[in-house]
Amino acid sequence: MPGPNTVGQILGIAASTRPDSVNRLLLKHVFKLLESQGIACVSPDYAELDAPSYSDMGYQQQGMPPGPAKLVTMMGRCNAMIIAVPEYNWSYPGSLKNIVDWVSCLKPCPLAGLPILLLAASPSLQGGVKGLIHFRVPLEALGGYVYPKLFTVSDALNVMDEHAITHPRIRDGLAETVTGFLDYSRRLSGV
């Protein structure tokens, strides 16, 4: 159980199956920031969360598929969630929406009341912001507390690598966003 002014374990999801995904890399840098502050982080392999197309009849007959069920279990052990979202055709991956739809079957919804930070990295100059704007809608509809400041990294292949975020403005902006999100999460938990 987290103590005063702490955020317990944070669940991070990089919504990509690509091993060289810039969103996986961005989440890795976020975890470095969090772990340097003593915050435990956990992240499933996105492929393990995969599920058949959502069907309310399927849920009634067979229950929750293993992928979303694993996510729900992990969410139950965490105090906040960070999702790095690739932008596909100016929106977010359909697989991610499908997972959210499965999770939404449970009452109360595990997303309700959960602080959520949305991030995106993209090789494009827009940085994935359009996908994040779209994705926050279903999360908020299900009661998730999406942090108001979305964080994006444009030209991602040229501003970060395995070891560091090399662009000072992006590095400092990410640190500021993560600090703000931690404060937001603490205030929501009433500590």
Image (tube, rainbow, N blue to C red):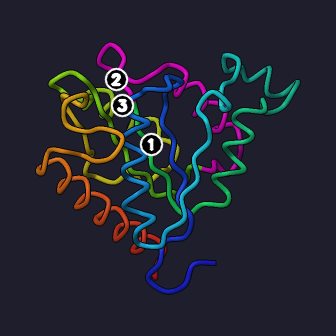
Q: Residues within 10 Å of mark 1 (few under 14, many from 20)?
A: many
Q: In this figure, which residue is indicated by the disc labeled 2?
A: 87
Residue at coordinates 70% horizontally, 18% vertically from top-left?
52
Q: Which residue ends up furthest to the front in the rendered image?
A: 163
Tell me which corner region of the image, top left, top right, bottom left or bottom right, holds residue 131.
Answer: top left
Q: Say if 26 sits above or below 179 in the image.
A: above
Q: Residues within 10 Å of mark 2 (few under 14, many from 20)?
A: many
Q: In this figure, which residue is indicated by the disc labeled 3?
A: 22
Residue at coordinates 40% horizontally, 57% vertically from top-left?
32
Between the C-alphas of marks 2 and 3, the distance is: 11 Å
Sequence-first tag of 1 and 3: 3
Dot 2 amino acid type: Glu
Q: Residues within 10 Å of mark 3 (few under 14, many from 20)?
A: many
The secondary structure type at the circle numbered 3 is helix
Between the C-alphas of marks 1 and 3, the distance is: 13 Å
In the depicted view, which residue is nearer to us: 26 or 116?
Answer: 26
Q: In this figure, which residue is indicated by the disc labeled 1?
A: 83
Sequence-first tag of 2 and 3: 3
In the depicted view, which residue is nearer to us: 93 or 188?
Answer: 93
The secondary structure type at the circle numbered 1 is strand
Q: Position of residue 98 (x, y in %)?
A: 59, 24
